[in-house]
Image (cartoon, rainbow, N blue to C red):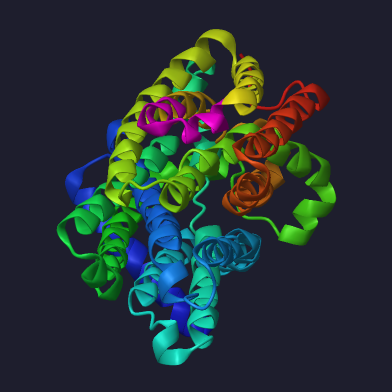
């Protein structure tokens, strides 16, 4: 296997390298575009599954329970990807060390696209019974493992190789993929739900976004390979010691930094799903409006999120990333005390909830990437940052839709704010424990 795989990796990177040589040196603007394409493809896959967890899977996979219970079951499967993501990092970091970053990204993105498109062919409970849920869970695990392998170290690289007073600006660039991926996914589902009958949508219409995801992943793969294959990019990784280290060795040597680093952005990661996935489920279950109406609101929220992420770069460079993360955590704590109730206040309340939520999400999430790279010793920086990201997503976001819907359906919308409040408090505690975390002013 080694003999067959290594030439494949070299051939891939050599082909892309020849393209780079013909084109000339890649500019920072081209690198930024490639990064945004890569992140957008990952988040598009993510949101396509998340939206289907609300609109499709409760009926297709869990028709034998009531709608609320079916949605909770769907959210439980949703969390599997976040549990599997650290496993993916463990496996793919080993592939990175053995065969190179090009091979790792190629396998990871094809696994991500393959798992996503496989969901598009998923049979329902009516065809295969409980095996529909088992297959869905396996495909979801495949997505999570692939996301662990899709880590390319760019946030760490940007955090360490830009002028001291521009770190915030460059750190926010990869984060733009989240609202962009949401906007494309929500718009596509809004079009399908509004143009098809309910029967046609549940029969075949919902499958198309999963097929589109595979095509987007192929484009993203070549965009990212074009970046990682450049000599300048490799030199920057080597000069900054951004090379994969053994996972167990990294955990033993940098465990405290990994844990604190994972809790530092917890407020934004908890808010991430509480303003994207959870409100769609609440509105779909407890209001009479069609899903396309709220999906359009989510598209508009994504626009606000893009603007807020861009603003976070300016604010972080002006006031310091640690100060910005701390202030946004306090704002999220305040938001958690009143905002969830807005979802029960009609369409105006929904719009206000989403607008305020995406402003806070953009400002905080925009600086949650690359914040811990400087705290790791050189040999462990690349792997440590990957594990930190995995742990933050698992603890802060993986169970957010499930917990939020369970609490709000049993104890009222105000109870969902408790989850957000816990994330905000965890962020403030982590920033207090390590004042150097999240970059320097």
From this viewpoint, is residue 418 visible?
A: yes
Label count reads 0
Residue that appears at 60% across and 58% down: 82
Residue that appears at 46% across and 28% down: 353
How far across and down, in percent of the image, does residue 218 sit? 29, 63
The answer to whether 323 appears left or right of 119 in the picture is: right
Farthest residue, direction front: 288
Answer whether residue 85 is magenta in the image: no
Image: 134 above or below 95:
below
Image: 12 above or below 414:
below
Q: Main secondary structure of the magenta part?
A: helix
Farthest residue, direction left: 195
The answer to whether 278 appears left or right of 216 in the picture is: right
Pick the front one: 56 or 108? 56
Residue that appears at 32% across and 66% down: 210
Image: 128 above or below 392:
below
Q: Quadrant of the C terminus?
A: top right
Which portion, as a residue range, is magenta?
A: 339-353
Pick the front one: 329 or 85? 329
The answer to whether 290 appears left or right of 94 in the picture is: left
How far across and down, in percent of the image, does residue 113 sit? 37, 67
Answer whether residue 351 is magenta in the image: yes
Residue that appears at 68% across and 44% down: 411
How far across and down, in percent of the image, does residue 108 sit? 46, 66
Farthest residue, direction bottom: 128
Q: Quadrant of residue 438?
A: top right
Q: Quadrant of residue 112?
A: bottom left
How far across and down, in percent of the image, does residue 266 sit? 66, 37
From this viewpoint, is residue 382 visible?
A: no
């Amino acid at each position: 296997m080694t003999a067959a795989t290594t030439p494949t990796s070299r051939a891939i990177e050599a082909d892309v390298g020849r393209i780079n040589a013909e084109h000339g040196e890649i500019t920072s603007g081209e690198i930024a575009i490639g990064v945004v394409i890569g992140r957008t493809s990952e988040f598009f896959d993510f949101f396509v599954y998340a939206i289907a967890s609300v609109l499709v899977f409760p009926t297709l996979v869990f028709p034998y329970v009531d709608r609320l219970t079916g949605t909770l079951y769907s959210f439980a499967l949703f969390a599997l990807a976040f549990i599997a993501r650290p496993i993916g990092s463990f496996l793919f970091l080993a592939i990175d060390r053995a065969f190179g970053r090009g091979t790792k990204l190629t396998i990871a993105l094809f696994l991500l696209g393959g798992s996503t498109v496989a969901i598009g062919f998923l049979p329902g409970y009516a065809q295969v019974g409980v095996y529909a849920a088992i297959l869905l869970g396996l495909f979801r695990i495949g997505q999570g493992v692939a996301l662990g392998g899709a880590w390319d170290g760019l946030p760490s690289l940007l955090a360490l190789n830009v002028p001291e007073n521009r770190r915030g600006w460059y750190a926010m660039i990869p984060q733009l993929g989240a609202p962009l991926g949401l906007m494309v996914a929500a718009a596509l589902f809004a079009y399908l739900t509004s143009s098809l009958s309910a029967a046609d949508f549940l029969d075949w219409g919902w499958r198309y976004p999963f097929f589109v995801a595979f095509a987007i992943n192929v484009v993203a793969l070549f965009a990212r390979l074009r970046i990682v294959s450049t000599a300048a990019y490799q030199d920057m990784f080597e000069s900054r010691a951004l090379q994969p280290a053994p996972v167990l060795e990294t955990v033993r040597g940098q465990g405290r930094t990994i844990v604190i680093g994972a809790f530092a952005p917890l407020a934004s990661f908890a808010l991430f799903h509480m303003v994207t996935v959870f409100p769609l489920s609440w509105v779909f279950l407890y209001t009479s409006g069609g899903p396309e109406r709220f999906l359009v609101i989510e598209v508009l929220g994504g626009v606000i999120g893009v603007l807020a992420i861009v603003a976070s770069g300016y604010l972080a460079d002006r006031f310091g990333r640690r100060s910005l993360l701390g202030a946004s955590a306090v704002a999220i704590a305040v938001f958690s005390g009143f905002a969830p109730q807005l979802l029960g206040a009609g369409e105006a309340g929904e719009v206000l909830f989403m607008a305020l939520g995406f402003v806070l999400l953009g400002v905080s999430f925009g600086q949650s990437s690359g914040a811990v790279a400087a705290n790791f010793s050189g040999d462990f920086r690349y792997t440590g940052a990957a594990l930190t990201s995995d742990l933050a997503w698992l603890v802060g976001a993986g169970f957010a839709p499930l917990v939020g819907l369970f609490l709000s359906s049993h104890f009222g919308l105000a109870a969902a704010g408790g989850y957000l409040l816990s994330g905000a408090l965890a962020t403030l505690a982590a920033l207090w424990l390590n004042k150097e975390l999240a970059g320097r002013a």
